[in-house]
């Protein structure tokens, strides 16, 4: 996932627009949607969160509300997270 996110942040080639909400950057296909992120089915959902993983506001709260106690337990098991770390 980190490699794919790096492709978005620093595309090495051309980013090609494919319609109003789709683009392709090398092997990565990107689609932008408006809606409830917590209802999306995806390989990964990205949420900016603090290193304490509080998940009590914003996108993190919406994901927590949808996923329930299983996500809360998993997040609480994370140790020594730094800004920019990926946790799953």
Image (cartoon, rainbow, N blue to C red):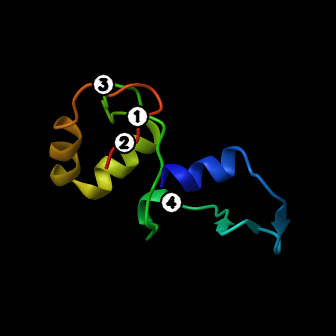
Quarter of the image for residue 23 reads bottom right
Q: Earlier in the sequence, mark 3 or mark 1?
A: 3
User: Could you tell me how far apart the alpha carbons at marks 2 and 3 are, in whole angstroms?
Assistant: 13 Å
Label 2, secondary structure: give it: helix
Label 1, secondary structure: give it: loop
User: Could you tell me how far apart the alpha carbons at marks 1 and 4 are, in whole angstroms?
Assistant: 15 Å
Q: Earlier in the sequence, mark 1 or mark 4?
A: 4
Say if mark 2 contacts mark 4, CB within 8 Å.
no
User: Could you tell me how far apart the alpha carbons at marks 2 and 1 are, in whole angstroms?
Assistant: 5 Å
Q: Nearer the viewer, residue 43 or 26?
A: 26
Quarter of the image for residue 52 reads top left
* CA neighbours of label 2 inside 10 A, class few (<14), some (14 to 19), many (20+): some
Q: Nearer the viewer, residue 85 or 68?
A: 85
Instruction: Look at 31% across and 31% down and name the residue there.
Output: 53
* CA neighbours of label 4 inside 10 A, class few (<14), some (14 to 19), many (20+): few
Q: Earlier in the sequence, mark 2 or mark 4?
A: 4
* CA neighbours of label 3 inside 10 A, class few (<14), some (14 to 19), many (20+): some
Q: Which residue is mark 4?
A: 36
Q: Nearer the viewer, mark 4 or mark 3?
A: 3
Q: Residue furthest front?
A: 12
Q: Which residue is mark 3?
A: 52
Q: Nearer the viewer, residue 57 or 77?
A: 77
Q: Position of residue 19 (x, y in %)?
A: 83, 74
Q: Which residue is mark 1?
A: 57
* CA neighbours of label 1 inside 10 A, class few (<14), some (14 to 19), many (20+): few
Q: Earlier in the sequence, mark 4 or mark 3?
A: 4
User: Could you tell me how far apart the alpha carbons at marks 2 and 4 are, in whole angstroms?
Assistant: 12 Å
Label 3, secondary structure: give it: loop
């Amino acid at each position: 996932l980190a490699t794919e996110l790096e492709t978005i942040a620093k595309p090495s080639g051309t980013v090609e627009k494919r319609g109003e909400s789709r683009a392709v950057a090398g092997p990565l296909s990107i689609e932008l949607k408006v809606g409830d992120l917590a209802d999306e089915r995806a390989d990964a959902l990205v949420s900016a969160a603090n290193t304490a993983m509080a998940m009590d506001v914003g996108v993190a709260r919406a994901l927590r509300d949808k996923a329930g106690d299983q996500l809360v337990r998993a997040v609480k098991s994370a140790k020594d997270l730094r800004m920019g770390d990926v946790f799953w």
